[in-house]
Amino acid sequence: MPKCLISGAETETFLSFGRMPIANGFLDRGEFQSEYFFELKVGYCPESKMVQLTELVERERMFHENYAFFSSTSRRMAEHFGRFAEFVQRSYLARSSDPFVVEIGSNDGIMLQHFASRGIRHLGIEPSANVAKVAQSKGVHTISEFFDEALAQRIVAEHGQADAFMGANVMCHIPYMHSVMAGVRRLLKPTGVLVFEDPYLGDIIQKTSYDQIYDEHAFYFSVASVEYLVARHELELIDVVPQHVHGGSMRYVIGHRGAHPVSENVIKQRLFEQELGLERPETYQQFARNVARSKQELMTLLRDLKQQGKRVAAYGATSKSTTVTNYCGITPDLVQYISDTTPIKQGKFSPGAHIPVVAHDVFAKNYPDLALLFAWNHGEEIMANERAFTDHGGKFILYVPKVHLA
Ligand code: SAH
Ligand code: TMP
């Protein structure tokens, strides 16, 4: 039985997606033979309430100088991070005479650029060197390292403690969470806060958005599991704010124990989680059945469309789509290509399924009949941009929360 990364207790594996490649491991034809696979499976720990991967991939296989995800590919996300920066500045920096903010997983500087442009002392920690370079070129102070307790100590020695430590879509990536939290505790001033957001377990369960589960996401956080985790480090969850981005995320605000009042939002969200059954193993068994049904419905639809002679392409070579294509068995005869605006992905093949990734032009110049929306979390933005496709009779295929056409 695998042990919980947080409590050390035994976890109950409730779902396996089988053999899975690296979600962001877009590759050339010549690399097919040496492609790396692991078993993607998830478990629940009744002690810590943490849902987590029960087999992990080494971090260097995922985060390196050819990392394929550039945060600034979505305009809506850029706006979101502008608001995130404002929230932190307004709520937690106002009383500091020389504020200092640190962000982990700062990627291409999408959030820290707002602090840089306001002349606020800041530091980005981004191990993937190629995306870190983009941030540096924008004037965002960034070091290319993995955050942990040892690095936190070095930062404190060099820059002093921080008013705010931020992270978006990164805390859930780090299996050595106790080292991270010990680092947070050292790094934060007595009134400092950790503000982070990640896809929310409640949304994943409610929407059957199983594609949030992939190698990089070691944890699927809930308010209950985050409370358990931070309490082990004399920290305290003081606020939670649900977010619409990435199909439903949660922002968590954490301070040193007793340093801040605890918002009612925390209690309300815990009650919501209990009602949803996030602390009942049966909920995860039901989720596993819902996932199997979703796969069956999507594959039935794709096979029917093929029989009808329809041309189907996909939109957005997301990391999430690696779980969908490999788990469902989507092959290039069902989905001809994936359109994506990220230059580093274009001309490559999708991990495992080996569907060609092409530039958006290919899609726009010769619309397919249907587009499987792998980037469903950016659905509003994409559908607004692609009116010409739908006006032309094109339809999007969605599979969250249910398989349907739009
Ligand atoms: N915050 C951005 C990027 C999320 S992708 C956004 O929300 O769009 C996750 C990022 O975390 C990657 O750029 C990856 O290189 C980085 N990362 C992974 N492990 C890390 C660690 N231990 N410390 C700091 N960053 C890490
Ligand atoms: P994400 O879901 O992990 O944010 O990844 C989104 C992917 O979709 C990324 O590779 C960029 C791509 N994309 C497009 O191709 N067109 C778009 O309009 C948007 C918003 C994203």
Image (spheres, helix red, strand yellow):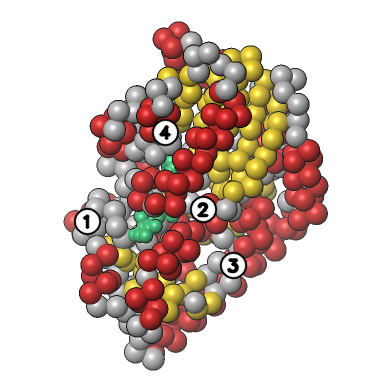
* Image marks 2 and 3: residues in contact by CB distance under 8 Å: no
**Distance between the Cα atoms at labels 3 and 4?**
34 Å
In the displayed structure, 73 sits above or below 6; it is: below
Q: Is residue 294 above or below residue 147?
A: below
User: Residue 246: which numbered mark, if any?
Assistant: 2
Of labels 1 and 4, earlier in sequence is 1
Q: Nearer the viewer, residue 406 or 388?
A: 388
Q: SS class of the residue under badge 2?
A: helix
Residue sitting at x 24%, y 53%: 343
Q: Which residue is mark 1?
A: 28
Q: Residue at x 50, y 18 (%)?
A: 99
Q: Amino acid at mark 3?
A: Pro
From this view, report whether residue 169 is shown above or below residue 204: above
Residue 230, how many percent across, how many down?
Answer: 67, 28
Q: CA distance from mark 4 to mark 2?
A: 21 Å
The label nearer to you, 2 versus 1, is 2
Q: Nearer the viewer, mark 4 or mark 2?
A: 4
Q: Which tag, 3 or 4, sits closer to the chain's start?
A: 4
Q: Residue at x 45, y 31 (%)?
A: 104
Determine which residue is flagged by label 3: 401
In the depicted view, which residue is nearer to us: 327 or 376? 376
- Label number found at residue 114: 4
Tell me if residue 238 can be seen.
yes
In depth, the one of 326 and 88 nearer the eye is 88
The amino acid pointed to by label 2 is His
If you read the primary sequence from the N terminus, does the residue marked by circle 4 or circle 2 appear first?
A: 4
Q: Tell me if the residue at label 3 has its CB under 8 Å from ligand 2.
A: no
